[in-house]
Image: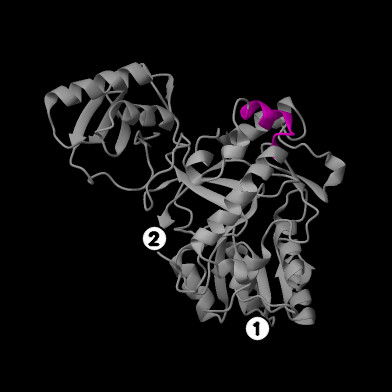
């Protein structure tokens, strides 16, 4: 519980923030060498972006926008100043989104996540993420090798051949999806193959429910979760404390109101936004479309960085009502115009084949005048008629949902 990858993980939060934000202006200047960032930063004094409040004023770049941006200005949408030939590997993910790999030893910042999961130098790692065109396989491969492990580049599938590799090389650790780990173990048991060397795992890419965690434990495998993306690499990872996920070093994570760039209070569910500090290929306020929340306090494992509760759903709740799109940022705009309100949730249903919108709003009082004012704002912002219900403060769920589409698709 007190074994750490390096001293960065246990420095004081104030020391960490001072380091990150001292480096940030230089990274922003490097980013501004790329035409798309230069346009976004126009009129902003980047030297003043030295704390979280200032960072929150910079524009958000949504991952959902990247396919169109990359198509318009291939390969990287104008967000990368360095030539393609200066990177180590060049990948693509569905969209398509094009991703370059830095030439750094631990390009995807994953070694400390593996270390927290019990991987150690000299371990043999069976890596079952795909190596074909997408970054997944190489994220874990380069991270394990940076830690000093040997890697079996197995990829997914071909279980019979994987049994041979496992029995020959006796890997102590596994990386891949939790689903494939179960498939491999079940198939190995049926075939009478010896899988007993695998004692540790770092899994990602699919849900890892409590029931499956317990099953892995019963089979002698200590398995941990990691949250990351093909663009960023490892964002946060589980530790021996088993309390949320610790944010990775050398990145800045914000949790914001879905559809906006506005930070929410600690503990409130919002969208994950990440800024990286690699001047060769910086990401500035990349909104991932995934929901999470800050977990209060410091991890019992001794790591002092921010913790998040893990993946809690998708932030993009855009829906169509009576032929018109309604977006989370519109619900946020209603909240801005009525600061006395707490959480807001727009529920969309159908009544006799007609779409119906009802906005529930936490309010200090249930007066008819306030309800009418909010209804008027709802109509002005969405261009649609809707009902408004005022509810008691704290009564709406803290799940990050601004829009709940409850129409049945019969």
Image vertical order of residue 304 relative to residue 167, above or below? above
Label 2 or label 1, whichever lies nearer to me, is 2
At x 75%, y 67%, the residue is 146
Work out whether 391 lies above or below 337.
below
Most common SS among magenta residues: helix
- The answer to which of 160 and 48 lies nearer the viewer is 48
Residue 405 placement (x, y as % from top left): 37, 35
Q: Which mark is residue 261?
A: none
| Residue drawn 76% across the image and 73% down it | 148
Mark closest to the chain's N terminus, 2 or 1: 1
- Would you say residue 36 sits in the magenta stretch? yes
Q: Is residue 341 above or below residue 174?
A: above
Find residue 225 and report its horizontal and vertical position in percent. Answer: 55, 64
Residues rendered magenta in the picture: 31-41
Residue at 50%, 73% in the rendered image: 302
**Label 2 close to label 1 by CB (< 8 Å):** no
Helix, strand, or loop for circle 2?
loop
The quadrant where residue 332 appears: top left
Tell me if 282 is positioned left or right of 238 in this view. Answer: right
Q: Is residue 160 left or right of residue 314?
A: right
- Indicate the quadrant containing the C terminus: top left, top right, bottom left or bottom right: top left
Classify 91 as above or below 205: above
Q: Which residue is mark 2?
A: 296
Q: CA distance from mark 2 to mark 1?
A: 38 Å
């Amino acid at each position: 519980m007190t074994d750490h990858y390096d001293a960065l993980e246990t420095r004081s939060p104030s020391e960490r923030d001072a380091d990150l934000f001292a480096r940030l202006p230089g990274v922003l200047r490097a980013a501004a060498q790329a035409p798309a960032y230069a346009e976004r930063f126009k009129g902003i004094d980047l030297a003043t972006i030295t704390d979280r409040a200032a960072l929150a004023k910079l524009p958000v770049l949504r991952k959902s926008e990247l396919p169109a941006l990359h198509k318009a200005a291939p390969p990287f949408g104008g967000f990368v100043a360095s030539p393609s030939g200066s990177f180590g590997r060049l990948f693509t993910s569905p969209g398509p989104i094009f991703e370059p790999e830095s030439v750094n030893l631990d390009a995807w910042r994953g070694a400390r996540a593996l270390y927290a999961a019990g991987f150690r130098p000299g371990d043999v790692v069976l890596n079952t993420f795909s190596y074909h065109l997408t970054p997944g396989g190489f994220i874990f491969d380069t991270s394990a090798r940076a830690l000093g492990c040997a890697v079996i580049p197995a990829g997914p599938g071909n279980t019979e051949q994987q049994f041979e590799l496992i029995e020959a090389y006796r890997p102590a650790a596994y990386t891949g999806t939790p689903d494939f780990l179960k498939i491999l173990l079940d198939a190995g048991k049926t075939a009478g193959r010896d899988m007993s060397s695998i004692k540790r795992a770092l899994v990602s890419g699919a849900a890892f429910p409590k029931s499956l965690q317990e099953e892995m434990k019963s089979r002698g495998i200590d398995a941990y979760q990691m949250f990351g993306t093909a663009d960023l690499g490892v964002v946060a990872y589980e530790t021996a404390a088993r309390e949320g996920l610790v944010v990775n070093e050398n990145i800045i994570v914000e949790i914001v109101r879905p559809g906006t760039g506005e930070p929410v209070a600690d503990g409130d569910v919002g969208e994950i936004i990440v800024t990286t500090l690699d001047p060769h290929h910086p990401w500035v306020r990349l909104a991932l479309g995934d929901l999470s929340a800050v977990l209060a306090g410091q991890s019992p494992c001794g790591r002092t960085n921010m913790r998040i509760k893990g993946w809690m759903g998708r932030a993009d709740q855009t829906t169509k009502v009576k032929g018109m799109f309604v977006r989370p940022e519109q619900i946020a705009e209603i909240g801005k115009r009525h600061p006395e309100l707490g959480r807001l949730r727009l529920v969309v249903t159908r009544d006799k084949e007609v779409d119906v919108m009802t906005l529930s709003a936490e309010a200090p009082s249930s007066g008819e005048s306030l309800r009418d004012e909010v209804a008027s704002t709802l109509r002005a912002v969405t261009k649609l008629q809707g009902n408004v219900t005022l509810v008691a403060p704290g009564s709406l769920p803290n799940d990050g949902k601004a829009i709940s589409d409850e129409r049945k698709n019969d």
